[in-house]
Amino acid sequence: MNPQIALLFVLIFIFIAIYIEHKRAEDISGAVWIVAIWFLYIGSKGLGFFLNTQTTLEQGSLPDRYFLIILGLIAILILIKRNFPFIPAFKQNWPVTLIIFYMLISVAWSKYPGMAFRRWGREAIALIIALLLISEKNPIQTLTSALKKAIYAALPLSIVLIKYYPVYGREYGRWTGEVMWTGIASQKNGLAMLCALSILFFIWSFLQGRVKEKQFNSPIAISIDILMIMLATYLMMGPRHTLTYSATSFLALITGITIMLSIIIASKKGNNLNKIIVISAILIIFTGIFMPFSGKLPSRTLPKLLNRSETLTNRTQIWNALVPYAKKHIFLGYGYGSFWTTELRDQISSHAHNGYLDTILELGIFGLFLFILFIYKLMLNTMIYIKNNNFFSCFLLALIFMVILRCIAESPFGEFTSFSTWLVLCWSFMVNKENDNLINIGKETS
């Protein structure tokens, strides 16, 4: 098929799918489009890549910078119009406030303060969009609708880019020349994690529909969601057509589904899994922290089951190269967004392939402690919501497990600008309410 015709068909499908979803959504304002665009953006390569902007990591991308500034300003104006109580929101979610503030002051000891401040600006915009979400009359409904809109666009577009526009949708291994599917995402594992999150999300959506049977009144909408699961599975299997193509994302998905179903079943039976959940999370996090520094894997069997070498596709070599850098600035790090340069990426890797190590490199042990404190407090608050039969909390708790597990071999931990960690950020504001005042403040939506 001609690439332009294929793209046209996909764009028509996306328009129809989003239109159907928007008509079905209730109690949401026009702000849902800002949230959907933001989620699609942070799951993609960025505007600079698609516009073929020639730049470096240190310079940044002007199209992306202007886009984020405009999106952030629109969100701020809406929040001001809604009289959003910023100070109470920051006080209630004090771990996030501490993290964002610490990221900002770490610019002071950065060797590249301009680059560090620009990256901190992305975190600030992620925070602003999260506040815009919770200012909605029904933030969970808005987030659900925004996620569907973004996924309806992301997955079909990824298929088109991979099949018909390989210069945008594929990458090739630096040393092996192996074909890797990236779609709209920045790299292979990013696309796979987007697919894993999509599968978990639609499974949750179907389970929720069994609780609220009116969700099943639209056979077309159900068919679209099933198609999305099929597309996500296909993309996640990659050119090898194996589930372990992205072993980390596959393992994270299995863990997420297991956690979500276990919580739902336990809640119905009246069983309390709080201690098991917290202990499991702590074990995963500390395993991820100590693996790079010990240079050893906790098990040699798991890599073989996932069709991987004992070095986890050379990750242990990357860790060995980075640990000496981490030890030099172990307490405060090199400053947020200041460790990785274009030269260092060419020499070692694009990132540490371990979210905990990457956090130590940029924010030190202190920054890592703040993020662990944030996750711990969030899990405890989520347990309360699960007790009160909040169905959405089961999905988010499963997502938290996916994030902390994925961080053992990937690097989305010490930031809020990946699609998975941004969802966790949003949830932290939703559950950190001592009452419903902040969640329901958006009655006068625009």
Image (cartoon, rainbow, N blue to C red):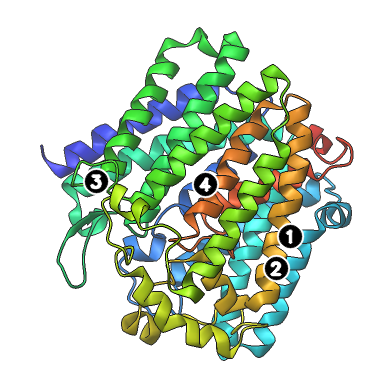
> Amino acid type of disc 1?
Leu
Query: Would you name the residue on which mark 4 appears?
Result: 402
Q: Is residue 186 left or right of residue 360?
A: left
Furthest residue toward left: 1
> Amino acid type of disc 2?
Phe
The Cα–Cα distance between marks 2 and 3, rounded to whole angstroms, is 36 Å
Residue 31 position in % (x across, y down): 64, 40
Query: Would you name the residue on which mark 3 appears?
Result: 238
Q: Is residue 226 above or below residue 135?
A: above
The Cα–Cα distance between marks 2 and 4, rounded to whole angstroms, is 19 Å
Front of the two marks 1 and 3: 1
Q: Is residue 63 above or below residue 29?
A: below
- Residue found at x 63% / y 29%: 263
Q: Using the image, tell me which numbered label, if any, was put on residue 373.
A: 1
The Cα–Cα distance between marks 1 and 4, rounded to whole angstroms, is 17 Å
The Cα–Cα distance between marks 1 and 3, rounded to whole angstroms, is 36 Å
Residue 253 picture quarter: top left
Label located before the other in sequence (1 or 4): 1
Query: Would you name the residue on which mark 2 appears?
Result: 369
